């Protein structure tokens, strides 16, 4: 290891970036697919931090793990920055807010190329003497591929990373097979998402070409000459993690083993926020214990931009995406606005709300694709994070109580988004799109704000919320205990233990109540009264409402039981639609395709009938 270089000069110190608790959003301007990233400058305390430092690149996992771990990765980046390590987190091409599509034929080299570019960008930051990569799941495999190809990364931390691409694909196939027994299409058959030799897992697809390229990645494949050290976080009961550490050591890489507990909790569900603080601390302490890095005077041709121009599908025009922040009492909301400067202007603006606690990309990235497609048609579109979700401020742990999705403050935040878009000169007509809790707010803000001309509501978890709603739903299952088919499914093992516990509690409560007699939200009357009032307001405003349901959605059944569906002729502005398969978050690709078709059809209707 080379000797420590002298401290930076005052001129270099002045170039240090101001610390923003949110992190600074940017795009790495790569061709053909710019990469969305967030940079967290290191905190400098009491004059410390002028010596060469380790910069960290967080390489994300793929698919559902990428979605569920997003807020945890943000917390990890903030933790590292506080410990003095400038940190960059990225979305891989074809994922998140980066450009590209899962259908691209060259995804794997694009993924590893994005990691290489991000590492080079980091290495050129003032005061950086070393670049370390934290590779999570597939992100670890890709980081190792990038290192093999010459990325300036000399230190890696690997967590939940298989030894090679073949092992990773075997795990995905097993997960896909398990999922296919639970999620079926409208015809009762397993979703046919493996067309052309590809694979679908958790609602995310891999093409045959991508799978072939992934199968060729091997973590221990030489050369690894640029890699000076590694840490493997070993998960309890996962023998493959220790085997991975062994393979690295056999390849000549000094490797440290440390506890990797906390992974399962961090990737479990976005509504159950559980940052792996023990792992965060372990990694920070390890970085701090490393020999001081050599002073680098790095340069890079990788440009960063604060807004980015992207190709917009098959349309002969590009769109521009720009991050925005909207101040609220608890901090800032974060969103991304997509516009096409060269597109014919319309008086519409689209707002995409969070699907539960999934960040602004929407279910299986549906909001990203739709917002860009609509922007290319001249409809500016913003995809937003609400409080505590994605990159917005607030406490993400609050959503362990699902009632927190339905507070008055959440509604006020939606109003703030509409007002902010209007202040930017967008609108004055708005179409609001939401799934789950986002659908609830699209429905209710449409009833309150005549500027909303369409509310596109997909699989709402509720249309009227009160604290007893979920208990009443469980209680209704008591009636099913008399159905012979239920006992047959129990005997066949098709109903799990957790579901049986819920049903048992419902039996004990003996609280079977109808939807129409249930209490309304915040003491506003019965459920039916609140719904009738909202529907009347929507009719009075002339707001188009589309209620679209997958199979087995409780809200659909409750609307039918209450008589609302039978009486929809009283509200001719309300349309009922169905989505294939029985999955709340639209994981089957056939459901995603149907949702895209529905959304585009409604946009066509709004454009064809202006005002």
Image (cartoon, rainbow, N blue to C red):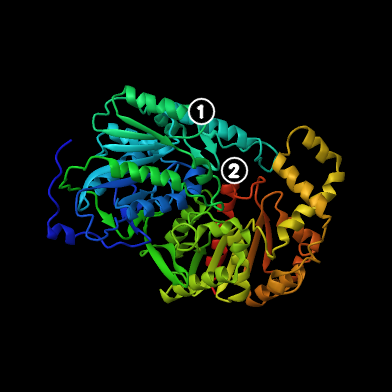
- The label on residue 238 is none
Q: Horizontal and vertical percent for residue 418? A: 50, 72
- The residue beneath circle 2 is 588
Q: CA distance from mark 1 to mark 2?
A: 20 Å
Q: Is residue 352 visible?
A: yes
Q: Is residue 30 left or right of residue 456?
A: left
State which tag comes first along the sequence, 1 or 2: 1
Residue 150 image-quadrant placement = top left
Element at badge 1?
helix
Position above or below: 146 against 390: above
Outermost residue toward the top in this view = 250
Element at badge 2?
loop
Q: Is residue 359 left or right of residue 117?
A: right
- The residue beneath circle 1 is 170
Judge by depth and name the residue closer to the eye, 171 or 85: 85
Quadrant in which the N terminus appears: top left
Q: Is residue 543 visible?
A: no
Position above or below: 532 against 469: below
Write the residue at 75% across / 43% down. 500
The mark closer to the camera, 1 or 2, is 1
Q: Residues within 10 Å of mark 1 (few under 14, many from 20)?
A: few
Q: Horizontal and vertical percent for residue 149? A: 27, 33
Write the residue at 41% across / 35% down. 258
Q: Horizontal and vertical percent for residue 610? A: 53, 72
């Amino acid at each position: 290891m080379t000797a420590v270089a002298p401290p930076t000069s005052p001129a270099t110190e002045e170039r240090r970036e101001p610390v923003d608790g949110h992190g600074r959003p940017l795009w790495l301007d790569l061709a053909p697919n710019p990469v969305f990233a967030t940079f967290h400058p290191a905190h400098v305390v009491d004059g410390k931090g002028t010596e060469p430092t380790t910069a960290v690149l967080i390489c994300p996992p793929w698919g559902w793990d990428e979605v569920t771990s997003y807020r945890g990765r943000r917390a990890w980046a903030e933790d590292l920055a506080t410990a003095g390590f400038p940190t960059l987190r990225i979305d891989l091409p074809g994922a998140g807010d980066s450009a590209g599509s899962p259908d691209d034929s060259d995804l794997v080299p694009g993924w590893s190329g994005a990691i290489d570019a991000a590492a080079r960008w980091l290495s050129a930051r003032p005061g950086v003497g070393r670049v370390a990569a934290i590779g999570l799941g597939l992100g670890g495999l890709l980081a190792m591929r990038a290192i093999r190809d010459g990325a300036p990364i000399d230190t890696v931390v690997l967590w939940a990373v298989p030894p090679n691409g073949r092992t990773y694909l075997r795990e995905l196939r097993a997960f896909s097979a398990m999922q296919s027994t639970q999620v079926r299409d409208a015809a009762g058959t397993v979703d046919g998402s493996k067309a052309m030799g590809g694979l679908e897992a958790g609602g995310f697809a891999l093409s045959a070409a991508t799978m072939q390229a992934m199968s060729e990645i091997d973590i221990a494949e030489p050369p690894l000459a640029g890699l000076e050290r590694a840490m493997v976080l070993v998960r309890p009961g996962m023998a493959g993690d220790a085997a991975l550490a062994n393979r690295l050591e056999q390849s000549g890489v000094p490797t440290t083993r440390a506890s990797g507990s906390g992974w399962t909790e961090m990737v479990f569900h976005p509504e159950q926020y559980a940052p792996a603080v023990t792992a965060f601390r372990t990694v920070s302490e390890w970085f701090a214990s490393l020999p001081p890095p050599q002073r680098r005077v790095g340069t890079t041709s990788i440009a960063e931009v604060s807004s980015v121009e992207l190709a917009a599908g098959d349309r002969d025009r590009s769109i521009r995406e720009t991050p925005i922040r909207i101040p609220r009492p608890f901090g800032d909301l974060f969103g991304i606005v997509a516009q096409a400067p060269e597109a014919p202007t319309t008086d519409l603006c689209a707002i995409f709300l969070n699907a539960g606690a999934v960040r602004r990309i929407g279910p299986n990235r549906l909001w990203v694709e739709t917002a860009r497609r609509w922007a290319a048609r001249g409809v500016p579109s913003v995809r937003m994070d609400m409080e505590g979700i994605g990159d917005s401020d607030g406490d993400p742990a609050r959503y362990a109580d699902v009632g927190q999705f339905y507070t008055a403050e959440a509604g006020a935040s939606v109003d703030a988004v509409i007002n902010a878009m209007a202040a930017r000169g967008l609108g004055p007509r708005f179409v609001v799109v939401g799934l789950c809790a986002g659908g609830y707010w699209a429905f209710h803000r449409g009833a309150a704000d005549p500027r909303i001309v369409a509310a596109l509501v997909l699989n709402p978890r509720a249309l009227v919320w009160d604290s007893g709603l979920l208990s009443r739903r469980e209680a209704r299952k008591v009636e099913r205990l008399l159905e012979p088919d239920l006992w047959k499914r129990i005997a066949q093992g098709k109903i799990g233990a957790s579901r049986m516990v819920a049903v048992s509690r419902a039996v004990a409560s003996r609280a079977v109540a109808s939807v129409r007699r249930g209490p309304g939200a915040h003491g506003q009357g019965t459920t039916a009264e609140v719904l009738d009032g909202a529907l009347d307001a929507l009719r009075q405003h002339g707001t188009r409402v589309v209620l679209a349901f997958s199979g087995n959605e409780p809200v659909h059944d409750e609307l039918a039981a209450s008589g609302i569906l039978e009486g929809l002729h009283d509200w001719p502005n309300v349309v009922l639609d169905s989505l294939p398969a029985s999955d709340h978050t639209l994981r089957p690709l056939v459901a995603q395709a149907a949702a895209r078709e529905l959304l585009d059809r409604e946009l066509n209707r709004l454009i064809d009938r202006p005002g």
